Amino acid sequence: MRGETAGKVLEMLKRGGVVSGQELARVLGVSRTAVWKAVKTLRASGCEIAGGSARGYMLKECRKPRAGAIARAAGTDSPLFLFSEVGSTNDIAMALLKEGCPHLTAVAANAQRAGRGRAGRKFFSPAGTGVYMSVVIRNVGNYSDLLVVTPAAAVAAARAVEDVFGISTRIKWVNDLYLEGKKVCGILTQSLTDGEGKIAGAVTGIGINVTGEMPEKLKDKARSLKESVTEEERDRLIGRVIARLGEVSEQLSSREFMDEYRERSCVLGREVVFEKDNITMSGTAERIDDDGALYVRCRGGGSSVRINSGEISLQSW
């Protein structure tokens, strides 16, 4: 039961109003201590929960959009948590993963105070402009599967954007979607291991710049998908991302989606710059293997260099 408590407490608090710890414990069939621990876990992961055991608990800033439309677009009955603003959707999803939540549990927010990308960089997450969400992937069987969760998520996000807006995006190795030479989506994957070191699951965070102006410092590098969108379109996009993640997560072992990943690549055949062993190198991106590694033929001939992590930059668009 402990593994489900935080998720169930969050579900009850989402209904609104103040709920006593005693009532939560009674409905969920757990102790008051278990409820307190669940609330503590949710708070630590970014959920804004007011009150205490003696005063009752209330979830603040809980967004109430058209959840039914999202669920229909997603085609799943997995838990869906929607907020006006959080610190990071990935932090909340990781806490739910630790508590044993189901496959494709999703957390989405209208804004993030501490959204982040690779290497701890801040991810621009203002209210009302993007889709900021994290989805739990439970069927990661081993470390080999984990290698391709991010490429799989990139394919899923690209498909979802096409589903809703009819816009075709390209994938910049390894985890970004680009439109007309500028970034429109970033992906950050985190994983969880059990006490024996086995993969317990992963969380993939996806931030899509749907609409709105980029700040001056980002205008040369990033853009939005469209000038304006409706709330219904944004909510449908959330649902389609979940649905498409459900599809590709079933193919982690078979790597069926990797052909599409390569077809959508905007780096193959291009001149790229990268770092390996603290040395800056450049060359032509030749191929991407089924584990998501990029092979670059460096200038001056010789064998290709295999890159399985890090970042690259394109010398020109």
Image: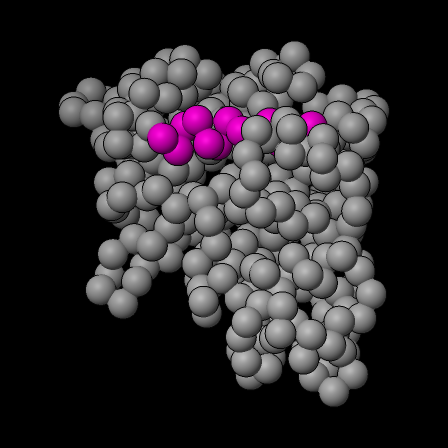
Colour mode?
A: one colour
- State the quadrant of the N terminus: bottom left
- Establish if 259 lies above or below 52: above
State the residue in front, 125 or 244.
244
Whether residue 248 appears in magenta in the rendering, the answer is: yes
Q: Residue at x 62, y 46 (%)?
A: 80
Apparent side of residue 144 relative to residue 44 in the rendered image (left or right)? left
- State the quadrant of the C terminus: top right
Estimate the x, y position of residue 114 in percent, counting from the top left.
65, 57
Question: For the stretch drawn in magenta, what is the main secondary structure?
Answer: helix
Q: Residue at x 30, y 62 (%)?
A: 194
- Establish if 87 lies above or below 38: above
Residue range in magenta is: 236-250
Whether residue 222 appears in magenta in the rendering, the answer is: no
Estimate the x, y position of residue 66 in percent, counting from the top left.
77, 37
Estimate the x, y position of residue 206 in percent, counting from the top left.
57, 39
Considering every residue shown, the one lying at the far left of the view is 302
